[in-house]
């Protein structure tokens, strides 16, 4: 038994005074052995788990930033355009990736509409009660060329309008016709309409009364199913809906009214899109650098002699390497671009010396290590906007933008190419395992070994405590037996004295 365990046992009192307090002794021994044998490896295990979690978070942040780099590398992030209508009450438009700058002459001549057919005879006093209708049928037929189907609805004598409408709606998916009930000044009537706009969704109704050649509903068309029509630069376009998605590539036009004369649709480049894309990329970088700074930081003790604290990756070579290699990639000078825009700093983007953030240069300067660096500085955002307006192509070359129809691209040149190469040194590796992943796996293996050791030690402690408990129980049993024997001996000794006294025998 260890010295610490004996010390723990010696502190246990036994108020009862009979036998040994087995449970208290066993608990004290287990606590002492556990503290002595498992504290150090458990602390090491906790440290490894913290390091692994920090490395996993770092790996995720690197991957997120690399994805942001791929997004910024695609020309789609830089070539964004917007659409403007000269008559927004008649039409509007949205653009998607690949839309080209241009101006179009537009005239909307007709809107798409639904067909609506109303019952004009035999209005009913109730929508759900017994009607005055005779037995017969309603036959719904689609217009020629429609993909919809015909349907025949049987009507029983006195059947309610609600029941008839339900029967019509049960076939809507095939006929393209739906029924409602209207409460008019003359009473309740059926209203039939196409479920979609467009000429091909028109229909006819045949109303038949059993034993008669005439109908009983008197259906009349209130509106006709028709297509939307418009001209763009003199070319005619039609759509079954009020949306035109094929007239101009990557432009969707929605019409909401007709025009009495030609109007203009302008597709223009959006100068703010590139700036927003760059800001999104910088934000992803700043999130990454904040994480690295936090996990590699060292905080001195609050007073002399007190220990400081360090982040979980304070000595990790991957994390500390990022702090030097990432800024190095950002500060690259791209020799293949005009000297006026051959670095991020030349277009107003710098690294803030205070926190390591990538941002547009501040015109007021920065404070660093107690010193204030000020002067006549240009506003970085203005510098970027000016560079884009003067030579957008050169700025894209500086970044290494790839002409692509996809939303992401892998850069091989420029600042983004340099950055991607740096990121790959941490995220790519032989046999599909990156240096970061290798470290994560190594930490996991160490944790497994320590956990196996702890499991083994805990089993041994349990066994020692059990053996100790058994020994204490045996000792208590022996003490009980000894006490019983002493009581018996005392009883015998007392009996012998009494007998000798009565017989007059001498006491020896």
Image (tube, rainbow, N blue to C red):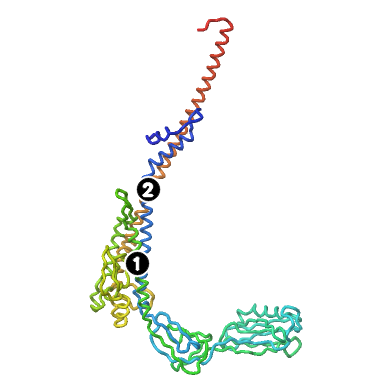
The one nearer the camera, 208 or 160, is 160
Split into 4 quadrants, where in the image is the N terminus?
top left
* Residue 361 in view in this figure: no
Mark with earlier residue (1, 2): 2
**Occupied quadrant, residue 360:** bottom left
Front residue of this view, candidates 351 and 426: 351
Residue 161, numbered circle:
none
> Residue 123 at x, y = what percent?
72, 85
Instruction: Label 2: state its secondary structure.
Output: helix
- Mark 1 highlights which residue? 286
Q: Position of residue 185 (x, y in %)?
A: 71, 86
**Rendering quarter of residue 311:** bottom left
Question: Few, some or many C-alpha atoms within 10 Å of disc 2 (few <14, some 14-19, many ≥20)?
Answer: few
Q: Give the Cα distance between marks 1 and 2.
A: 32 Å
Q: Does 331 appear above or below 503? A: below
Quarter assignment of residue 328: bottom left
Identify the residue under disc 2. Answer: 43
Query: Can the viewer see residue 362 in this picture?
Result: yes
When the figure is inspected, residue 342 is found, relative to residue 58, above or below; the finding is: below
Residue 489 is situated, as x and y percent measured from the top left of the image, at 53, 17
Residue 174 location, x and y as percent?
61, 80
Towards the viewer: 391 or 463 = 391
Secondary structure found at label 1: helix
Total numbered badges shown on the rendered structure: 2
Residue 60 lies left or right of residue 335; in this view the side is right
- Residue at (46% x, 36% y) in the render: 26
């Amino acid at each position: 038994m260890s010295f610490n365990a004996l010390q723990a046992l010696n502190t246990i009192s036994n108020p009862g005074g009979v036998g040994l307090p087995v449970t208290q002794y066993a608990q004290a021994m287990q606590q002492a052995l556990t503290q002595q044998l498992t504290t150090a490896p458990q602390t090491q295990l906790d440290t490894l788990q913290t390091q692994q979690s920090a490395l996993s978070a770092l790996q995720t942040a690197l991957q997120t930033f690399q994805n942001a780099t791929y997004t910024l590398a695609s020309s789609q992030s830089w070539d964004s355009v917007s659409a403007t209508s000269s008559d927004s009450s008649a039409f509007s438009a949205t653009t998607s990736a690949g839309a080209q700058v241009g101006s179009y002459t537009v005239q909307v001549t007709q809107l798409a509409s639904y067909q609506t057919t109303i019952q004009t005879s035999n209005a009913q006093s109730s929508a759900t009660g017994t009607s005055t209708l005779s037995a017969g049928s309603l036959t719904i037929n689609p217009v020629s060329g429609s993909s919809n189907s015909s349907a025949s609805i049987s009507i029983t004598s006195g059947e309610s309008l609600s029941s008839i409408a339900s029967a019509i709606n049960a076939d809507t998916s095939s006929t393209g016709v739906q029924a409602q009930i209207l409460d008019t000044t003359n009473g309740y009537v059926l209203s039939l309409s196409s479920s979609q706009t467009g000429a091909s969704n028109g229909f006819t109704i045949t109303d038949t009364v059993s034993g008669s050649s005439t109908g009983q509903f008197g259906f009349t068309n209130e509106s006709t199913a028709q297509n939307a029509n418009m001209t763009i630069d003199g070319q005619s376009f039609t759509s079954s809906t009020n949306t035109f998605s094929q007239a101009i590539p990557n432009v969707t036009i929605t019409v909401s009214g007709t025009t009495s004369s030609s109007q203009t649709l302008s597709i223009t480049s959006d100068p703010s899109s590139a700036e927003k894309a760059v800001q999104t990329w910088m934000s992803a970088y700043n999130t990454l650098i904040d994480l690295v700074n936090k996990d590699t930081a060292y905080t001195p003790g609050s007073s002399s002699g007190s220990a400081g604290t360090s982040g979980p990756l304070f000595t990790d070579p991957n994390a500390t390497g990022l702090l030097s290699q990432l800024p190095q990639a950002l500060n690259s000078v791209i020799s293949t671009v005009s000297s006026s825009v051959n670095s991020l700093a030349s277009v107003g983007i710098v690294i803030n010396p205070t926190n390591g953030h990538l941002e547009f240069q501040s015109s007021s300067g920065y404070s660093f290590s107690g010193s204030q660096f000020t002067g006549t500085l240009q506003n970085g955002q203005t510098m970027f906007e000016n560079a884009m307006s003067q030579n957008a192509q050169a700025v894209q070359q500086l970044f290494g933008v790839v002409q692509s129809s996809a939303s992401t691209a892998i850069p091989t040149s420029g600042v983004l190419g340099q950055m991607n190469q740096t990121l790959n040194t941490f995220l790519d590796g032989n046999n599909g395992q990156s240096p970061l992943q290798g470290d994560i796996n190594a930490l996991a293996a160490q944790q497994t070994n320590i956990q196996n050791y702890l499991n083994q030690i805990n089993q041994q402690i349990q066994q020692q405590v059990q053996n100790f408990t058994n020994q204490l129980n045996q000792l208590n049993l022996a003490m009980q037996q000894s006490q019983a024997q002493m009581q018996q001996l005392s009883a015998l000794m007392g009996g012998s004295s009494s007998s000798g006294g009565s017989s007059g025998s001498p006491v020896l």
